[in-house]
Amino acid sequence: MNQRVSFSNQSESKDSNPTSCLDSGIFTGAERVEIMNVVGRSRKLVSLLCRSRGLLEQKCVFRAARSSALHQQGHHATPPLRSRFDTQRWCSGDSDSRLLGSTSSQELSLETDHKNSQIIPPGHGYSETFNLDVLVSLLRQENAVDLCVIKVPEHIKYAEYFIVVSGISPRHLRAMALYAIKVYKFLRKDGDPNVKIEGKDAEDWMCIDFGKIVVHFMLPETREVYELEKLWILRAYDEQLMRIPPEVLPEDFMYDMEITK
Amino acid sequence: MALQRLSGSFSGLIVQNSSKILQRAFSVSVVAAAIQKMTRVRVVDNSSLGNTPYHRPPRVIHVYTKNGVGKVGDKVLLAIKGQKKKALIVGHKMPGDRMTPRFDSNNVVLIEDNGNPTGTRIKVPIPTHLRQMEGDFSKVLAIASSFV
């Protein structure tokens, strides 16, 4: 508890950037990781700490953190984070669409390698816009199971990125969806349309359409039934599509001729 | 063979129609709508309910809009194989807005009560202006294989 108390003390003094307090050498390495995980996973905790001291509102903390991060450290940390995503995205080498899969082991390596990126509360990243990096990092942080990002080819004018995520339970899916909406609302500027959750009453499949990105939250069983990743990677050569028997018109079919009484 | 029959019956109709119009005893109303009650529709997904043959084509028995007219993106209630099922209209024969596609058949995708599509793939092209409309269409767009 000592550690937490001193953390909120630091945020009390004008310097409310969590990165700087961790760098100031108060905590040892292991404690740093632990706190980062704590801070990274629960923004509510941070706000609780701040409020318990009777201080800053949640938004003020984040805005200060965000603006200071942008000026001070954002630019240092952005290129490594972005380049890692870029190499992963482009090295899978399919001609039509690119598949970016991730497992839990990669998630762990992300957390240990890019410490700085997790310190700032998720969703504010280093850019002010809600883009793919922000979304993927917040999904990873929410312990999303089987995250799959597919780059939709240009000739399909639907979206640019198609994401399919699984969850552990319907409640988990709902929590992830609501959190993504929250972050989007915080990061959007005037002029960006509002985004709603589609399929709120279907507990096993929810979607959010962010214009350029579409996210689907499904349970693993539902995912098995629909196999959306297969469809969106293999477009016309999908297995289920090929299984649909081709439609045969009957011999005496007459186009556009309605036989009425 | 079909074409010959078509041309034969067509010319016959043209000749007979003009005399019949003056004689008919029933009133004819203008086509009111795109999809309304009692229209026969074509189910375009790969669900078993929509694809198994039945002696009666699926018909609309209720349209969930303020007026009873269904356009693209409206939900309807179908009677298929003796059971009721909700469905979403994805194309109709009646011309709609400019720069929206018009289809040669009234296409419909079966949907559960919670909004999940019953089938898993749709082969028929789906209009992309569904995306801008109010309503939950992302699921149907996600299982579509081609867009128009």
Image (cartoon, rainbow, N blue to C red):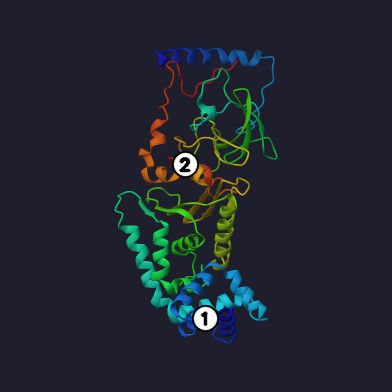
Disc 1/disc 2 C-alpha distance (Å)? 43 Å
Q: Amino acid at mark 2?
A: Glu
Label 1: how many Cα within 10 Å (few below 14, some 14–19, many 20+): many
Residue A71 horizontal/vertical position (percent): 46, 81
Nearer to us in this view, A57 or A145: A145
Q: Amino acid at mark 1?
A: Asn
Chain on which label 1 sits: A
Residue B40 location, quadrant = top right
Disc assigned to residue A224: 2
Q: Which residue is mark 1?
A: A17
Helix, strand or loop status at disc 1: loop
Residue at figure coordinates x 42%, y 62% from the top left: A107
Residue at figure coordinates x 44%, y 35% from the top left: B123
Residue A150 horizontal/vertical position (percent): 40, 52
Residue B84 horizontal/vertical position (percent): 64, 29
**Horizontal relation, residue A43 to residue B26: left or right:** left
Name the image quarter holding the C terminus of chain A: top right
Name the image quarter holding the N terminus of chain A: bottom right
In the rendered structure, which disc, 1 or 2, sits on the residue that comes first in sequence? 1
Nearer to us in this view, B118 or B58: B118
Question: Is residue B99 visible in the rendered structure shown here?
Answer: no
Question: Is residue B47 visible in the rendered structure shown here?
Answer: yes
